Amino acid sequence: MILAESPSAAAVLMVRPACFGFNPETAASNAFQRPPSADPAGPHAAALAEFDAAVSALRHAGVEVFVAEDTPEPPKPDAVFPNNWVSFHRDGRIVLYPMQAPSRRAERREALIEDLARTGGFRVSGTEDLSYREAEGKFLEGTGSLVLDRSARVAYACLSPRTDLDVLGEFAQRLDYDPVAFEAFDQRGRPVYHTNVLMAVGSRFAVVCAEAIADSRQRAEVLSRLSGTGHDIVEITQAQMASFAGNCLELSPPAGRVIVMSDTAWDSLQGAQRELLERQGRVLRVAIPTIESVGGGGIRCMLAEVYLPKRG
């Protein structure tokens, strides 16, 4: 039986990187990545400082943050983005996902999940392992590829080299989601690599770069589904998407809802957009410029929401 899920979580898993850096293997499909211009060792130290400050800010806001330490071997330059390889669900299931870049597949660590379950007192009822799809050259990179409306059971997915329609269908069938697939492109005509840089879904709001969805029918379907499930829509521009404005996440700690986004994202927004978001919850801003630029992912990518039930 599929249990109803809250639209946002009170707890997250974050992975403190051991070898953060620019990954040429992922840069081929991620237009957000920029190679560092200075000392190649510099980004790691800067990323650690940004990571620790983000953890502190989240905990201060009342979010329960479980920090796992990355292992130095093998080197995993993208380990700071755990939401791409795992998701946690209210019925106790864990989903493991197929990753496009071979260098990222070592991020899936059973010991990390076991530590989370033990430390947090969580009950795990089973694992849905989609990683076997890597052998077929088909990928679905977690809640990077998927933006989940967990209350309405809708899975939004922007198709790209990292997001395969067939694997999306398997996820939807196993987890009882209604898939909404579409194609989206940036200002230079490149496929948007992950859905979670294009859009975010909260309890009563949704952020979406509708102008990136080239097909008018697909664009209308996405907007209709969002409004039909009771969401106020914050439309963002291509330039704002490039500033990670779509890469935000609503969380629900006991003190009340917070919307987590980066300084880069917030600074790109205009007055009316900010006002709508501020009506939905307290905006929690974090500064992660190195992680965004060198890693090509934002604050939402760093947060794997934990919906697992507690052991009774």
Image (spheres, rainbow, N blue to C red):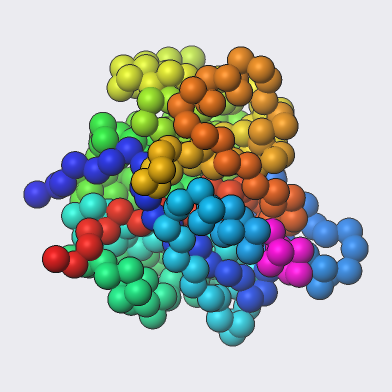
Question: Within the magenta stretch, is there residue 45?
Answer: yes
Question: Within the magenta stretch, is there residue 112?
Answer: no
At 59% across and 53% down in the image, what residue appears? 57
At 74% across and 55% down in the image, what residue appears? 290
Q: Quadrant of residue 17?
A: bottom right
Placement of 300 over or under 121, stated as above or below: above
- Bounds of the magenta span? 44-50
Q: How many marks?
A: 0
Q: Quadrant of residue 222?
A: top left
Residue 88 place in picture, x, y as percent: 32, 57
Residue 177 place in picture, x, y as percent: 25, 40
At 41% across and 43% down in the image, what residue appears? 255
Q: Residue furthest right?
A: 38
| Quadrant the C terminus occupies | bottom left
Question: Can residue 138 be seen in this snapshot?
Answer: no
Dominant secondary structure of the magenta stretch? helix
Placement of 186 over or under 147, stated as above or below: above
Q: Quadrant of residue 25?
A: bottom right
At 65% across and 22% down in the image, what residue appears? 237
